[in-house]
């Protein structure tokens, strides 16, 4: 039987943020390309964005009643044991009914219970760990799953060495060739030719502190004679859309044509979520990273350090923005040499074939 005719049943689990959802969808798309007759099921957290994004991508999804542990003592934490028991029970039902050949977890709360149940039933399971610092769920599951696909070096601190494969993080395929799209990007966003363009991205939901910074610095950006593509996120759009009146600013709730935004940009200001960082390496533009301090194990700062310690960008922590931002930005703007060096160094860190490499590993498990 040739590949096209073979069919498998595959569960993908992950979510909570775009950084866990988009890699799962990219992996599913690649598997579907190789095995068109296969059946796919996603499992996510029932009140998070995956419940909307996965069906939009054309896949079925089941939701679990689960959320993470909060750092503070709260009602949510008291509910956690009940949510966990409920999620394990529902995961058992899903696995028993769907009978998957393989289970793939891309991180986030929902992947924990599902991978635990699958591993317990000896179903081959694989983790895709996006961050340079593994989350608690994945660390616990590392001992039970067959393989762990990672994006950074030195991950044996968290996982059994023999199971680790360095693959990189899946990224959107339309980002692999953006050099040729610059003119198209300039036209699409109606940008002024010959003026430096700054792209501001705060992750899939937006970033309050970055938005506050950009609003405060609007006059400064005017003085620097740059134009802004500012993705502020859906929670913040109502508050910031008034700045669209400025000739050098365009505020977007969400950027749909991300490839064209990257292509048009000269400098990027971004959060340091794992998939954002992987995209930035492939895009290869000079970048200022402002990691979110409000994430588990402060992994965004660690992702950013993995870039900046190799001389491939600038890291400014949130509590240093007021004193450092203008100085760092001005220095970067004035030095074409620095911009070129950052571009060159960040491109060296790119792993553009991540999705195919991860699916190769999934295939090996299916063949066994």
Image (tube, helix red, strand yellow):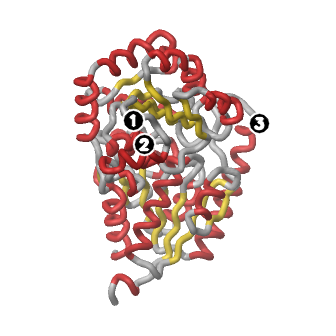
Is the residue 350 above or below the residue 115 in the image? above
Can you give x and y, in whole percent of width and height, for residue 113 in the image?
59, 56
Question: Which quadrant of the figure contains the C terminus?
Answer: bottom left
Quick one: label 2 or label 1, which is nearer the N terminus? Answer: 2
Q: Is residue 231 above or below residue 12?
A: above
Q: How would you rate the neighbour count of disc 3 (Cα within 10 Å): few for under 14, some for 14-19, many for 20 or more?
A: few
Q: Picture quarter containing residue 6?
A: bottom left
Viewer-nearest residue: 211 or 144: 211
Sequence-earlier tag: 3 or 1: 3
Instruction: Identify the residue at image location x=56%, y=34%.
Output: 250
Residue at (50, 76) in percent of width and height: 9
Helix, strand or loop under label 1? loop
Under circle 2, the secondary element is helix
Asked whether 53 or 186 is in front, the reply is 186
Quick one: SS at disc 3?
helix
Compare marks 3 and 2 and give the one earlier in the sequence.
Answer: 3
Q: Residues within 10 Å of mark 1 (few under 14, many from 20)?
A: few
Q: Residue lying farthest top?
A: 323
Q: Which mark is residue 75?
A: 3
Q: Residue 233: where, in percent of width, then height?
A: 61, 38
In the depicted structure, whether residue 92 falls above or below residue 21: below
Q: Image quarter for residue 242?
A: top right
In the rendered image of this protein, does residue 150 appear above or below residue 330? below
**Residue tagged by mark 2?**
186
Residue pointed to by mark 1: 193
């Amino acid at each position: 039987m040739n590949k096209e005719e073979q069919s498998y049943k595959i569960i993908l689990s992950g979510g909570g943020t775009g950084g866990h959802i988009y890699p799962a969808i990219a992996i599913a798309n690649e598997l579907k390309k190789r095995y068109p007759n296969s059946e796919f099921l996603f499992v996510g957290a029932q009140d998070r964005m995956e419940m909307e994004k996965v069906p939009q991508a054309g896949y079925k999804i089941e939701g679990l009643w689960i959320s993470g542990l909060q750092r503070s003592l709260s009602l949510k934490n008291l509910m956690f044991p009940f949510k966990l028991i409920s999620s394990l029970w529902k995961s058992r039902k899903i696995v028993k009914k769907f009978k998957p050949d393989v289970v793939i977890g891309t991180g986030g709360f929902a992947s924990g219970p599902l991978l635990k149940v699958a591993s317990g039933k000896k179903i081959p399971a694989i983790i895709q760990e996006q961050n340079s610092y593994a989350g608690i769920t994945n660390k616990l599951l590392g001992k039970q799953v067959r393989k762990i696909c990672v994006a950074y070096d030195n991950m044996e601190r968290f996982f059994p060495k023999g199971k680790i494969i360095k693959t990189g993080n899946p990224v959107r395929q339309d980002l692999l060739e953006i050099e040729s799209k610059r003119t198209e990007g300039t036209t699409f966003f109606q940008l002024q030719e010959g003026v430096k363009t700054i792209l501001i991205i705060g992750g899939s939901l937006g970033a309050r502190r970055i938005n506050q910074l950009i609003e405060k610095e609007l006059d400064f950006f005017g003085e620097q004679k740059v134009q802004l593509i500012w993705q502020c996120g859906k929670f913040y759009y109502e508050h910031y859309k008034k700045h669209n009146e400025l000739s050098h600013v365009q505020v977007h709730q969400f950027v749909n044509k991300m490839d064209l935004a990257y292509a048009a940009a000269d400098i990027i200001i971004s959060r340091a979520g794992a998939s954002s960082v992987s995209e930035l390496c492939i895009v290869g533009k000079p970048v200022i990273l402002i990691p979110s301090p409000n994430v588990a194990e402060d992994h965004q700062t660690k992702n950013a350090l993995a870039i900046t310690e190799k001389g491939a960008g600038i890291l400014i922590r949130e509590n240093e923005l007021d004193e450092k931002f203008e100085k760092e930005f001005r220095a970067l703007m004035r030095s074409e040499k620095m911009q070129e060096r950052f571009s060159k160094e960040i491109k060296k860190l790119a792993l553009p074939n991540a999705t195919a490499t991860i699916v190769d590993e999934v295939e090996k498990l299916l063949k066994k």
